[in-house]
Image (spheres, rainbow, N blue to C red):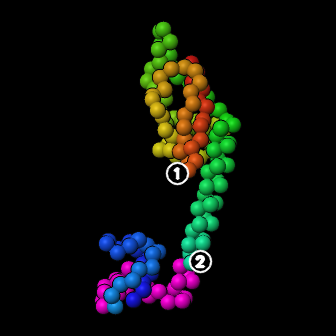
Amino acid sequence: MKVILLQDVKALGKKGEVVNVNDGYARNFILPKKLGVEANGKNLNDLKLQKNNEAKVAQEHLDAAKKLAEELKAGKVVLTMKVGEGGRTFGSVSSKEIAEAVKEQMHLDIDKKKIQLKEQIKTLGTHIVSVKLHPEVTAELNVSVKEA
């Protein structure tokens, strides 16, 4: 019997796959536990429509991430730090501070977990920080650190 899986089933397949299983396995395990549905014409058509919709939504997310990347690349964020004798800074700039500055200065919401700092920012000047907006889109943001 052909079955469309509604959830991932270990050793059988992933969600959305059409798999061929024994009739008893389908009747006694997969169908009663709502792990899958019989692969008839209506259900196959529903699966096709669902996959098309998911592809459309994924493309919209990718386009939005590319647009946000362009806005980040064009912008610049300015942060201030306390500086002691000899130009030494107190502490470092965190991803949380960068995210708050982007929200305040550029009016864009960015999750602090998406900001990737290669090393801690402990010096004054301009630094380039990468922001992973989407698995396929990484933006660069200019962060300028000035003396308070």
Residue contact at pointers 2 and 1, CB within 8 angstroms: no
Q: Quadrant of the C terminus?
A: top right
Q: Amino acid at mark 2?
A: Leu
Between discs 2 and 1, the one toward the N terminus = 2
Percent from the top left, x then y, of residue 57?
60, 64
Q: Which residue is mark 1?
A: 135
Task: Please state the horizontal and vertical placement of residue 125, each as a whole percent of the image.
Answer: 58, 21
Q: Is residue 148 visible?
A: no
Quadrant including the N terminus = bottom left
Q: Depth check: 47 or 98 in front?
A: 47
Q: Residue at point 47% right, 23% down? A: 122
Q: Residue lying furthest top in this view?
A: 86
Q: Which residue is mark 2?
A: 49
Residue occupying the point 59% across, 66% down:
55
| Element carrying mark 1 | loop
- Whether residue 18 is visible here, answered yes or no, is yes
Q: Which mark is residue 93?
A: none
Callout 2: few (<14), some (14-19), or many (20+) C-alpha neighbours within 10 Å?
few
Give the residues in magenta. 24-47
Q: Is residue 68 above or below residue 59?
A: above
Q: Nearer the viewer, residue 48 or 67?
A: 48
Q: Amino acid at mark 1?
A: Pro
- The correct choice, above or below, for 80 with respect to 115 in the image is above
How many C-alpha atoms fall within 10 Å of the one at disc 1: few (<14), some, or many (≥20)? few
Q: Quadrant of residue 31?
A: bottom left
The residue at the point 59 percent across, 41 percent down is: 139
Residue 85: where, in percent of width, then height? 47, 9
Vertical arrangement, residue 84 with respect to residue 97, above or below: above
**Alpha carbons under labels 2 and 1: distance apart:** 24 Å
Asked if residue 120 lies left or right of residue 49, the reply is left
- State the residue at coordinates (62%, 60%): 59
